[in-house]
């Protein structure tokens, strides 16, 4: 049994973000991190590995420097890593990205008891689309918004979160599960041994040459050309103008506030 | 059945996927139907709701009251509770047959499961979690003029462009992007709950709405997932999105969490008609349940009054509240970014300021 964990390196959007004058993001100014929900997927996979001894393979599609992230994930406990990287893959939207990742997993082999874990969504685009689209293209069932995952033989039980509760879902392998970051689910640290070993663990590069004979890979299904959606415009929202600072923080200030609210018929 | 998503001339009408849970329509359905009505008028096309479930025919007419010309109802026991498999099969089968030009889906935990799977099957594009939609280029240009820092006056636009222009936040709200899907149909979009405004209900329109029962076929082999249980969290759900007034607390209450939340509740009571929300820091610390979260990954609210108590005003928080009509912020750090979007700011300790606010509002109300 093997679990593929799809991880993405993303710019850390929690800090200050610089935007170029043309409305694009100044990525160079931001740190690259592993997408937070993907760390949850990684931890879920490692928990299953602890319990079953299964193999955990981390997969990413991105530029070559993503190798560093993959080595770190192997130092955390992944057994091997796959980097999908080619110029032809650049500019892909979620449709094209999922097409390529699905082709890569087909190429690597998806067996009857295997699973694919994704993060719920990546914080750069926040789309949450790549996981379900990989599942559709591999013609396997999906369960999204998973907070816990248990597996007995080929039977997987997932607690799937809803806005107002949850549902329990049973599904058979092979299947794809997208994981949400939960407070209780703390990603483990790299271990010293892990760091020593991570450069000796198997690392596979899948480029266009390696994947071009996969049926899912066509020039009109990958990259910019294969992306049904295009960015028409991107822009920064204007800051809403600051209002009035009411001086002091005493009774008079508060009375002033309430009077203003009342004058505006707000209360 | 021939279906080719790139034969874009063969597609017409705007569809809204109407999600039901336990046989009840969701608020997002009414928001989306109202928005869809506007788009259908811009496009000069019909607005059609598509409702999947079991024994749900009775709730379909209400969608007409918000602007649907027709509702397609797919009824089957296998559709009673949402499963990706059954819903994807039925929605895609009907869409392949009827060829809608646009499909709008609420960006709920269910919509965001269903949307991408369907888009992949239909071989078309999907834009996630949209906050603004336009068809008419004049309207889009108007929107950009108001809501962007672009030099709109010196940009040329193809005014005859009738593609759906789908705008959404990206990179945690630091950027907005307008996405189009020019070469494939249907053009699909999931739409953020709470952002589109629900229109007026018209009983006359509801009565006039056509209901079409659509035969569906689901076989056991189509179903690879099984829902064994649906559990509603027993806690009282807050209706943040529909609230007139929201009083939110942030990490600024950490000194005394219980008192801080108590003060927010009392302030909400003093306003009347108000509910308590929180920043992600508060939710992550377990001080308030998750459905109270306002922001990028929480709820988008636009109440009449939004009060931010001890909230720094991170961009992800602002993303969910900056369109409120009137914003009041209390923060002891006068440089906190929340003041950049507040109509009225008070630099001070919330534990001292809020009790005074409660008193002053009560006094004001007593005077009326
Ligand atoms: C992908 C992503 C998504 C996110 N989504 C959301 C989201 O949906 N919603 C959200 O809110 N955040 C979200 N965040 C987190 C966001 O970036 C901030 O970390 C969060 O909003 C901070 O919460 P806060 O303002 O309560 O806490 P802090 O930033 O710690 O601010 C606390 C404030 O309280 C003030 N204060 C302290 N004591 C007092 C006192 N006694 N009286 C008055 N003021 C006091 C301080 O001056 C400070 O300004 C997201 C982050 C990421 C990366
Ligand atoms: N380039 C990528 N490489 C590997 N996994 C990805 C990539 N893009 C998205 N994913 C996976 O799909 C999930 C959802 O991403 P998104 O649809 O972009 O929000 C992520 O959390 C990852 O698990």
Image (cartoon, rainbow, N blue to C red):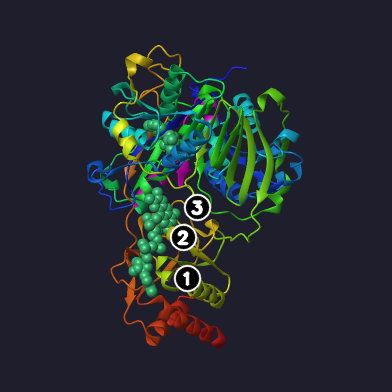
The chain ID associated with circle 3 is B
Asked whether residue B164 appears in the rendered view, the answer is no
- Residue A232 belongs to the span the image colors magenta: no
Q: Quadrant of ligand 1?
A: bottom left
Give the quadrant of residue A151. Answer: top right
The location of residue B99, given as percent across then percent down, is: 58, 27
Measured in 3D between alpha carbons, the distance from the residue under mark 3 to the one under mark 2, in whole angstroms, is 27 Å
Q: Which residue is mark 1?
A: B257
* Circle 1 chain: B
| Residues at marks 2 and 1 on the same chain | yes
- Pointer 3 or 2: first along the chain: 3
Point out the tag, 1 or 3, that comes first from the N-terminus.
3
Q: How many marks?
A: 3
- Above-or-below relation of A46 to B26: above
- The answer to whether residue A245 is seen in the rendering is yes
Residue B131 versus residue A124: which sits nearer the camera? Answer: A124
How many neighbours does mark 1 have within 10 angstroms: few (below 14), some (14-19), or many (20 or more)?
Answer: some
- Report the span colored magenta: B118-145
Residue A189 x/y as whole percent:
37, 44
- Return the residue at label 3: B195
- C-alpha span from label 2 to label 1: 10 Å
Contact flag, marks 2 and 1 (Cβ < 8 Å): yes
Q: Position of residue A180 (x, y in %)?
A: 49, 44
């Amino acid at each position: 049994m093997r679990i593929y964990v799809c991880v993405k390196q993303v710019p850390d959007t929690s800090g200050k973000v610089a935007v170029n004058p043309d409305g694009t993001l100044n990525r160079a100014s931001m740190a690259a991190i592993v997408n937070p929900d993907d760390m949850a997927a990684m931890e879920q996979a490692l928990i299953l590995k602890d319990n079953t001894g299964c193999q955990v393979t981390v997969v990413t599609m991105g530029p070559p420097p993503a190798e560093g992230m993959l080595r770190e994930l192997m130092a955390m406990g992944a057994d091997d890593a796959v980097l999908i990287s080619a110029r032809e893959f650049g500019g892909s939207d979620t449709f094209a990205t999922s097409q390529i990742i699905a082709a890569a997993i087909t190429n690597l082999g998806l067996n009857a008891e295997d699973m694919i874990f994704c993060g719920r969504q990546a914080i750069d685009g926040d789309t949450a689309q790549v996981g379900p689209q990989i599942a559709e293209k591999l013609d396997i069932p999906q369960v999204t918004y998973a907070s816990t995952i248990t597996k007995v033989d080929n039977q997987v039980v997932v607690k799937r979160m809803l806005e107002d509760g949850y549902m329990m879902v049973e599904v058979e392998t092979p299947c794809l599960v997208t994981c949400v970051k939960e407070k209780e689910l703390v990603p483990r640290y790299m271990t010293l041994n892990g760091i020593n070993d991570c450069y000796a663990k198997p690392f596979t590069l899948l480029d266009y040459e390696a994947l071009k004979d996969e049926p899912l890979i066509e020039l009109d299904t990958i990259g910019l050309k294969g992306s049904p959606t295009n960015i028409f415009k991107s822009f920064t929202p204007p800051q809403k103008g600051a209002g009035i600072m009411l001086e002091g923080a005493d009774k008079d200030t508060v009375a002033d506030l309430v009077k203003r609210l009342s004058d505006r018929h707000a209360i | 059945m021939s279906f080719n998503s790139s034969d874009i001339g063969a597609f017409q009408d705007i569809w809204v996927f109407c999600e039901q849970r336990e046989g009840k329509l969701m608020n997002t359905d009414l928001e989306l139907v109202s928005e869809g009505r506007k788009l259908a008028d811009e496009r000069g096309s019909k607005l059609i709701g598509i409702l999947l479930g079991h024994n749900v025919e009775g709730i379909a007419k209400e969608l007409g009251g918000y602007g649907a010309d027709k509702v397609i109802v797919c009824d089957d026991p296998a559709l009673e509770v949402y499963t990706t498999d059954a819903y994807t099969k039925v929605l895609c089968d009907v869409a392949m047959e009827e060829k809608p030009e646009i499909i709008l889906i609420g960006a709920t935990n269910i919509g965001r499961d269903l949307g991408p799977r369907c888009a992949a099957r239909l071989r078309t594009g999907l834009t996630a979690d949209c906050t603004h939609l336009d068809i008419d280029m004049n309207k889009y240009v108007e929107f950009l003029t108001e809501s962007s820092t672009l030099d709109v006056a010196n940009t040329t636009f193809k005014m005859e462009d009738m593609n759906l222009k789908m705008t959404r936040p990206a990179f945690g709200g630091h950027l907005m992007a307008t996405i189009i899907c020019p070469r494939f149909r249907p053009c699909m979009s999931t739409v953020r709950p709470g952002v589109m405004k629900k229109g007026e209900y018209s009983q006359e329109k509801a009565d006039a709405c056509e209901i079409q029962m659509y035969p569906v076929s689901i076989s056991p082999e189509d179903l690879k997932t099984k829902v064994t249980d649906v559990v509603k969290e027993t806690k009282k759900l807050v209706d943040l999105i529909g609230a007139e007034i929201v009083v939110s607390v942030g990490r600024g209450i950490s000194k005394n969490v219980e008192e801080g939340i108590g003060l927010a509740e009392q302030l909400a009571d003093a306003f009347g008609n108000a509910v308590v929300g929180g920043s992600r820091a508060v939710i992550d610390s377990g001080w308030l349940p998750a459905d109270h979260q306002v922001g990028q990954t929480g709820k988008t609210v636009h109440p009449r009054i939004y009060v931010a108590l001890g909230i720094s005003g991170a961009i992800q928080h602002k993303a969910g509240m900056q369109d409120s009509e009137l914003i009041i912020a209390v923060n002891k750090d006068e440089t906190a970014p929340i003041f950049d979007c507040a109509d009225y700011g008070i630099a001070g300790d919330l534990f001292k300021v809020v009790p005074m606010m409660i008193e002053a509002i009560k006094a004001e109300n007593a005077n009326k």
